[in-house]
């Protein structure tokens, strides 16, 4: 190992050329401008659905969710319908850094989502922010990493932004500074052969400030809109990484998915109920099931949720009981929702805790539901769903049973999934109508899309624009090729075409299953930590 890395990967969660290119043209992103001018660049296609929690394990294992086992920000507790946040212990394939360690390369891993708790690695690891309950030794390997960051940063901001107030913009500013400085401190003080960094602040800014993304674009003022602020932060980090790279280092930039405007919200459970596939333990429109004295007015519910944490536990339980929403009656439901996108699971007998659909009827239920969904009207009067995929069309591997049976693509993923829509509303509401009604479901103006970005510059790269999109599953094979390593045969991806042919290696056999690092029965979180992570995911709209 030398003082300079051989390869750096910078992951920018949610980055899209639809935003990056106008910013480059306006002169705001010199780091990206150099990348486009000197290197290879193009689109990087995500997976269905484009959920951060399953995208990054796909990127860093080179396998689809059916092999690596992570489909969502949460998974179900064994034998129940209770959800818990997904952790690093749920990965079922070896991550890239483990493979590189086996080849004698040290790796620095910084802020990759779904990597809590941090695991031993030859190099260092800082767990991803969204699944880390608090800043403590469990998020660092070795512990000296936390000490190195702590000496330079007053606060390593974990909490994501959750709205559009000035306070949230200040939080975003702190988070950008903390992520960038921590990444550079570790590169300078703990040099490794390979560096893998992910920043989430671009995605977070686009969720809440999408409509303002081009405001003041040509003003070149110090103050800019939050989306541009976040992109400037990512570009500053990229430029700093390019400076530290040296001539013999390849720098790769990529995103897990793209972004676009939110057009509406869909209460998925209520839609399933209207189609006859789901039952509630209490009817959402039955006012007697929800005591009116205990329900906060819709506009005040965000404030009420923030105040809840200051109440004694007994009063919190009472408030939740008074605010109870209709819950799913699983034993009576043939289908239930399992994700932040339109991911649906058949309540299959023998597979689910209270399954009511015989295994022999699964295909018929899926076929009937696909037909019903294909005829569901969208916001513009046409079909709501562009396509409805079956499990086998998207996933393959030993863990496909963990995933959804059906995945719908609602209007190019511009329609967000939600729960608890007011009973006086239809289960599908446009963003304009939702804002008029003051519904908190519509605070997020931006949502995920399939097409993200990829770019690279360095000695192993053929420069130029890529006419065809690569896939996020191609990232790990490509990184290994850039390092002169062969691709394990169990991987689903291929080496991207911009890698020079003279440094590619042939495929060799490797063990398919991830070696057991820890007991799979181990709980990653205490109850309090799980509650903290769940609340953070709720603020981002990834949990209801």
Image (spheres, rainbow, N blue to C red):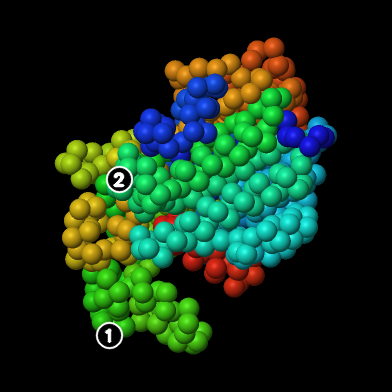
Picture residue at 69% right of the left edge, 29% below the top: 246
Indicate the position of residue 540 as horizontal and vertical percent values.
44, 57
Q: Is residue 57 visible?
A: no
Q: Is residue 294 visible?
A: yes
Q: Secondary structure at mark 1?
A: helix
Picture residue at 27% right of the left edge, 71% below the top: 298
**Front residue (pair 12, 434):** 12
Indicate the position of residue 139 as horizontal and vertical percent values.
68, 58
Q: Is residue 121 left or right of residue 494?
A: right
Q: Quadrant of the N terminus?
A: top right
Indicate the position of residue 107 as horizontal and vertical percent values.
74, 40
Q: Earlier in the sequence, mark 2 or mark 1?
A: 2
Vertical placement of residue 472 versus 323, above or below: above
Indicate the position of residue 40 as horizontal and vertical percent values.
53, 22
Q: Is residue 418 left or right of residue 424?
A: right
- In this view, the residue farthest toward the left is 381
Q: Quadrant of the C terminus?
A: bottom left
Q: How many marks?
A: 2
Picture residue at 46% right of the left edge, 43% below the top: 231
**Labelled disc at residue 215:** 2
- In this view, the residue farthest toward the top is 502
| Residue at numbered disc 1 | 293
Quarter of the figure with residue 437: bottom left
């Amino acid at each position: 190992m030398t003082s300079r890395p051989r390869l750096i990967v910078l992951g920018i969660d949610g980055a899209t050329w639809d935003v990056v290119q106008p910013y480059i043209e306006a002169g705001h992103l010199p780091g990206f401008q150099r990348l486009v001018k000197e290197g290879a660049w193009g689109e990087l296609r995500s997976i269905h659905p484009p959920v951060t929690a399953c995208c990054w394990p796909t990127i860093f294992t080179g396998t689809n969710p059916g092999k690596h086992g992570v489909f969502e920000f949460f998974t179900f507790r064994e034998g129940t319908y209770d959800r818990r946040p997904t952790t690093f212990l749920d990965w079922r394939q070896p991550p890239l850094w483990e493979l590189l360690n086996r080849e004698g390369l040290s790796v620095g891993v910084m802020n990759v989502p779904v990597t809590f708790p941090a695991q031993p690695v030859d190099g260092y690891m800082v767990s991803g922010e969204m699944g880390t309950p608090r800043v403590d030794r469990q998020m660092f390997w070795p512990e000296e990493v936390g000490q190195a960051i702590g000496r330079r940063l007053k606060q390593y901001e974990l909490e994501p932004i959750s709205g559009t107030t000035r306070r949230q913009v200040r939080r975003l500013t702190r988070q950008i500074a903390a992520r960038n400085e921590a990444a550079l401190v570790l590169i300078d003080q703990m040099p490794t052969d390979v560096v893998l960094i992910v920043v989430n602040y671009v995605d977070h800014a686009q969720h809440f400030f999408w409509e303002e993304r081009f405001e003041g674009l040509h003003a070149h003022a110090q103050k800019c809109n939050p989306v541009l602020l976040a992109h400037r932060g990512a570009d500053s980090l990229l430029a700093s990484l390019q400076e530290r790279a040296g001539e013999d280092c390849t720098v790769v930039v990529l995103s897990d998915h793209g972004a676009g405007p939110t057009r509406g919200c869909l209460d998925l459970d209520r839609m399933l109920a209207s189609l006859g596939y789901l039952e509630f333990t209490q009817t959402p429109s039955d006012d007697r099931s929800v005591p009116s004295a205990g329900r906060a007015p819709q506009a005040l519910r965000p404030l009420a949720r923030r105040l809840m944490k200051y109440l004694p536990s007994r009063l919190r339980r009472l408030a939740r009981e008074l605010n109870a929403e209709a819950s799913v009656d699983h034993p009576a439901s043939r289908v239930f929702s399992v994700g932040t996108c339109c991911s649906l699971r058949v309540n299959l007998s023998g597979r689910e805790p209270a399954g009511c659909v015989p295994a022999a009827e699964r295909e018929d239920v899926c076929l009937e539901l696909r037909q019903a969904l294909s005829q569901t009207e969208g916001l513009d009067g046409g079909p709501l769903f562009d396509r409805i995929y079956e499990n086998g069309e998207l996933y393959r591997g030993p863990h496909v049973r963990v995933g959804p049976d059906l995945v719908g693509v609602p209007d190019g993923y511009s329609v967000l999934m939600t729960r608890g829509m007011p009973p006086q509303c239809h289960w599908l509401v446009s963003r304009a109508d939702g804002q008029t009604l003051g519904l908190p479901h519509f605070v997020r103006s931006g949502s995920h899309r399939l097409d993200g970005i990829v770019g690279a510059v360095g000695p192993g790269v053929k420069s130029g624009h890529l006419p065809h999109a690569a896939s996020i599953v191609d990232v790990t094979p490509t990184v290994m090729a850039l390092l002169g390593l062969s691709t394990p045969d169990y991987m689903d991806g291929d080496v991207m075409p911009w890698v020079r042919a003279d440094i590619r290696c042939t495929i060799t056999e490797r063990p398919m299953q991830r070696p057991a690092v820890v007991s799979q029965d181990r709980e990653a979180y205490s109850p309090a930590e799980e509650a903290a992570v769940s609340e953070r995911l709720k603020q981002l709209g990834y949990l209801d």
